[in-house]
Amino acid sequence: MNLLTFRTEEDLNRAGAGLIASLLQAKPKAVLGLATGSTPIGIYEELVKLHRGGSVSFAKASSYNLDEYVGLSGSHPASYRCFMNTHLFDLVDIDPANTHVPNGLAVDLEQECAYYDAMIEDAGIDLQLLGLGHNGHIGFNEPDDSLIAGTHAATLQHQTREANARFFDSIYDVPKQAVTMGVAPIMKARQVMLVVRGESKAEIARQALTGPITTKCPASLLQLHPNLVVLMDEAAGAWTK
């Protein structure tokens, strides 16, 4: 585990983007596991700058997103497909056919999940980008007595829906389910980059990275990953001092 704390958000964003850019420079056909929410936005902005400056190309790369809300089409402004198009895909030279987000409108969700797992297994994720939920979730793998290994339809806890309500008109509009990668494809990624921001995430980051490994804190399983890098701002990483 490599823990890195940054004085400014700009430094954190540049470091995160730099890791992804370095991978793409060394391996143009890299497979990226991508995340949504407020955590990775600054990193995506830096990647767009690097691309526009000619430092990095996504032309041969492919991507697999962690999750998508059940019941939302890709054109819905709060969908994760729309998020990725807005913040990254439409701003770089990646082939849209090589960008993958679970289908939240699939008639047969079980079949969709199996299909998504098969694609990821065949591709092999080189770098998985993750944020950290206030309750320790990664993707939408919520705390529980046990976790589902593969991609699955997860029921979102109230705290998670509350945290995501800022992207909707109200909490009542936040879907109650999402299709999410399970812990198995996340842990199979060759490298995992966990990004944590803000004082409100400091305690859960400490628990996840130094506490017991338990499904009650899904992010704690990352302690078992052989190539984990953690990027934190000063507020989130205050416990490391």
Image: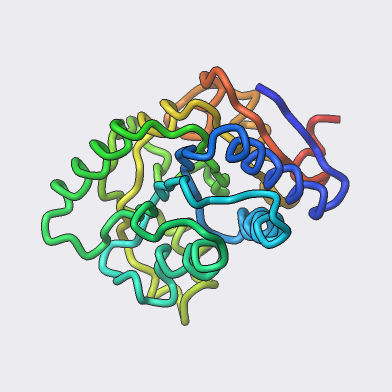
Please give left or right for residue 28 compared with residue 177 in the image. Answer: right
Quadrant of the rendering where the N terminus is positioned = top right
Please give left or right for residue 111 compared with residue 217 in the image. Answer: left
The percent position of residue 194, horizontal first and vertical second, equals 60, 38
Q: Residue at x 56, y 67 (%)?
A: 91
Give the quarter of the image for residue 202.
top right
Scheme of image coloration: rainbow
Q: Residue at x 38, y 75 (%)?
A: 172
The percent position of residue 103, horizontal first and vertical second, equals 26, 59
Give above or below for 21 relative to 84: above
Give above or below for 105 relative to 33: below
The percent position of residue 27, horizontal first and vertical second, equals 54, 34
Q: Residue at x 39, y 70 (%)?
A: 174
Give the quarter of the image for residue 122.
top left
Residue furthest bottom in the image: 169
The percent position of residue 140, horizontal first and vertical second, equals 41, 48
Q: Nearer the viewer, residue 180 or 166?
A: 180
Quadrant of the rendering where the C terminus is positioned = top right
Q: Residue at x 70, y 50 (%)?
A: 55
> How many numbered callouts?
0
Please give left or right for residue 141 compared with residue 135 in the image. Answer: left
